[in-house]
Image (tube, coloured by chain):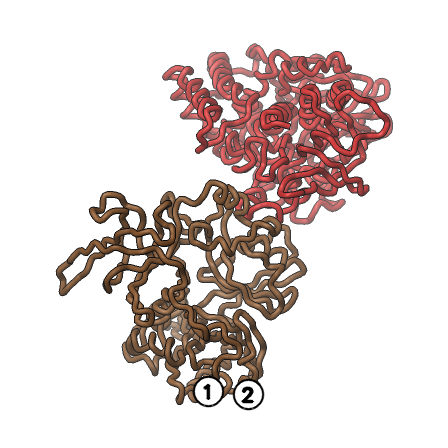
Amino acid sequence: MAGTTSSAPPARYDVIVIGAGHNGLVCATTLARAGRSVLVVEAAAEVGGMAITRGFAPGYRVSACAHLLHQMPLAVIRELGLAEHGLEFAATALPTTAFGPEGRALTLARAGVPGEAFTPHDAAAWPAYHARLGRFAGLLQGMLAAPPPRLGTDAWSDKLALAKVGLKLRLLGRRDMREFLRIVGMNAYDLLADEFESSLLQGALGFDAVLGTNFGPRAPGTVLTLLYRLAAESAAGSMPLAQPRGGLGALTLALARAAKAAGVTIRTSAPVERITVAADRASGIVLACGDEIGAERVVSSADVKTTFLRLLGAEHLDTGFVRRVDHLRSRGVAAKIHLALDRAPKFGALAPPALGGRLLVSPSLDYLERAFNPTKYGECPGEPALEITVPTINDPALAPTGHHVLSAIVQYAPYAPASGWNDAARRAFTESILATLEVHAPGIRASLMGCELLTPLDLEREFGATGGHWHHGDLAFDQFYMVRPVPGASQYATPMAGLYLCGASCHPGGGVMGLAGRNAARRVLEQGV
Amino acid sequence: MAIDRTPVPHFRKPLLDTPFHDRARELSQNDSFVPWAGYSTVDVFTSAEQEYFAIRNAATLFDLTPMVKYRITGADAERYLNRLVTRDVRKLKVGRVSYVVWCNDAGHIIDDGTIFRLAAEDFRLCTAERQLDWLLDSALGFDVRVEEVTEQIAALAVQGPTSCYILRKFGLAGVEQLKPFQLAEFDAHGRPLMVSRTGFTGDLGYELWMSPEHAVTVWDELMAAGRTRGLRAIGSQALNMARIEAGFLMPNVDFVSAEHTIRMNRDRTPLELGLGWLVDFDKPHFNGRRALLAQRAAGVRRLLVGLDVDGNKPAHHALLYADKDGNREVGSVTSAMWSPTCKRNLALAIIDAPYHATGSRVWADIYLNRELVWERRMVAATVVERPFFAPERRRLTPPADR
């Protein structure tokens, strides 16, 4: 029963959640609070999944994968009482600064105060653009926190949910609805080139459209990914671009404490060998150590390929479904680099709070597209685009006194370079990244005390996400909403009775949002356990 | 400019010849060849009736080389096939053959065929249509190798009451011991030959599987051995008559593969085709199982059944009605023939519930073209059990020595 603290764990739970990432923990806590006995099993030694803080050089700690919190709704944070469970923020409402050529820089505050790099045209276009995209994002925002409807069913709830989406679209008004329908399938490149003159502004805004996706800014559908990001950020209320004190791992530690307080049992260093099946339903799990644990329901926050093809096994599924799972596009293209520095990096004259914010190297849309091109052919870009944070500006405890940590998402990096990720390939790519950094923060190499590169392959190995994809699968029209991750498993329930998905594979997808976990928990409760 | 004429590009000869093609051409009096699965094959050699009567009264040779063949090997071959088809392949012993169907996720039939278990981890799957994409997609997660071997294996069906005699005279000592759906390897004058007691006629008969290089010799020696027993080559028309009497289904005639249907409600499940006996719900998971379980619980809304139509006018493509006035349509005929052996007017038809129950009477709307003038007959028909024709000799082991 929930809340019991007996020393011998029960042999059987109402629900077993696979994976103690943010979605797994949100799901487990929601279920436990509804009175269910819940076990969370985690392969790694610590909870956190892709939202984890760990060391990478002696004395230096960093958010090993996601490094900013900007999509978790305040409602979730409040609902789970994360503040009471120790979640603090080193900084919130961080500004974004984009670096251009010749030391130019452009700081975008969320409020959108035009900086000096705006041309008069851009300054005039900015407020309207911001407001319009905000309204469109609001349309999508309503879709995030509920399971997507199923098509072709007779259920009223599905029809109602679909009608709601249609109604919201209609309520945008004729002009906005037309504009929304005009741009939603478009590419970010054309949209931004239509709206703005400044290539630096275009590059900075375009970066958000492609971060973590396998698209260049010219790919159709990148306006959708941009709107989707904005939708998640607007769902997060006043928080966007927040830095938890202690890194992203502090968020999942708070989640784990909330889970335990709700009565969830968490077992770490407990990789799942397989999901067991009895009488054509998921009946529990077998751990690598050999322990067999039974449950009424198994909920997996692992990605859809890992869940179905490795943990469950194709033999329990139909060929067509397996084919859809296998065809899901989940090849990661984002790498991560962590630098240990003996002093604060100098990005021109940038000072806190901007220096402690989000720093972009994406000086133009063409730069982004050029960074994407080589990855199509299994090569690394010579000049990658970067999302940089220097978390020690706001949270000095992550490094020895006076020292700093730089964490950057490197967009784009091939999952499988032609040469394989051997030492030479890693060195060459690290070199490209450092050279790119050196352009904008001269002298940074001289302050280097340690360096860690995580390629998509490394991310796959460390976090178990197939293809090393942050979002457990590209977010694109054909892997979106009602068909995410694949038809037949897009409402958290799966073709295997008793088995549910709750990870980033599901609607509303990746990013440290937690909504997939919460939606899944609600679906599990709805279907009765 | 010089033109290279030596190779014949595939697009200049889209249909392949089987290894028996030269013999077929010599014997064909009608020059009536039709495409079948990418091969040129004989429709009728002399007359369909004559060939049909040879199936029922003597013996026949039918070239079934175009039958699509896959070799499936590997440690997981049994597990793989068991997930693919609706029958329990674990029960199929080495040296046995099984008639199977396989479905998509929705439980709709993709194709039917036969599985030959050649060894514990070596199977041959014979299908009507090419299936490689489905077979390979189904292999994901299994340690199995799937190869298409259609062109590597020539095949002949020897069917009819005298077929066993002819095969023994041809030199296959012990072939009379083969039970239905059993297979064995033979040595035919130094040439390896696999023989299975299988066929599409519902009669005593065998199928011979060989390397294409031996094909013509085997054909010639069989023809020589069968001279005194009325052996003759037959085309697909005569075979089609025999298979209707036997109650066997023909893909794309009695049902359309779920891979090809476009319209709603054109897919068929095994339960709707009266093939529920092929579906083993007690074995581990197989493709379409969950959908078929749901259909079994809800009951089928239509069923493929045998019809005994009054009169002697074949009910080709007839619409079926619940009443003589034709007010309520309840189904349609998929195959029809006047059966010379049964002396009955037979049909296979798909009929809505509840009219598909055995013994129920429906009305067939038959159109007759009589010297270019169309006439219409509303004829009563009775739903009957299949097969229509099932002679004792098809199962008797050893068969009569004649």
Residue B236 vs A152, above or below: the answer is below
The image shows residue B152 at horizontal and vertical percentages of: 52, 72
Q: Residue at x 67, y 44 (%)?
A: A310
In the image, which disc is placed on residue B189? Answer: 2
For mark 1, give the secondary structure.
helix
In the rendered structure, the colour chosen for chain A is red
Would residue A252 appear left or right of B183 to someone viewing this image?
right
Residue A519 vs A81, above or below: the answer is below
Q: Residue at x 50, y 31 (%)?
A: A482
Image quarter (top left, top right, bottom left or bottom right) of the C terminus of chain B: bottom left
Would residue B235 appear left or right of A109 to someone viewing this image?
left
Tell me the distance, in whole angstroms, between the alpha carbons under discs 2 and 1: 10 Å
Give the residue type that dot 1 points to.
Glu
Front-lying residue, B353 or B280 = B353
Front-lying residue, B63 or A106 = B63
Residue A250 seen in render: no
The image shows residue A205 at horizontal and vertical percentages of: 55, 23
Query: Within 10 Å of the Cα at label 2, are there few (<14), some (14-19), or many (20+) other Cα atoms?
Result: few
Q: Which residue is mark 1?
A: B221
Residue B227 seen in render: yes
Q: Which chain is brown?
A: B
The image shows residue B283 at horizontal and vertical percentages of: 61, 52
Residue located farthest toward the front when viewing the structure as drawn = B359
Chain of the residue where label 1 is placed in the rendered structure: B
Give the residue type that dot 2 points to.
His
Image quarter (top left, top right, bottom left or bottom right) of the N terminus of chain B: bottom left
For mark 2, give the secondary structure.
loop
Would residue A115 appear left or right of A454 to someone viewing this image?
left
The image shows residue B147 at horizontal and vertical percentages of: 56, 63
Quarter of the image where one finds residue A228: top right
Disc 2, disc 1: CB below 8 Å?
Answer: yes
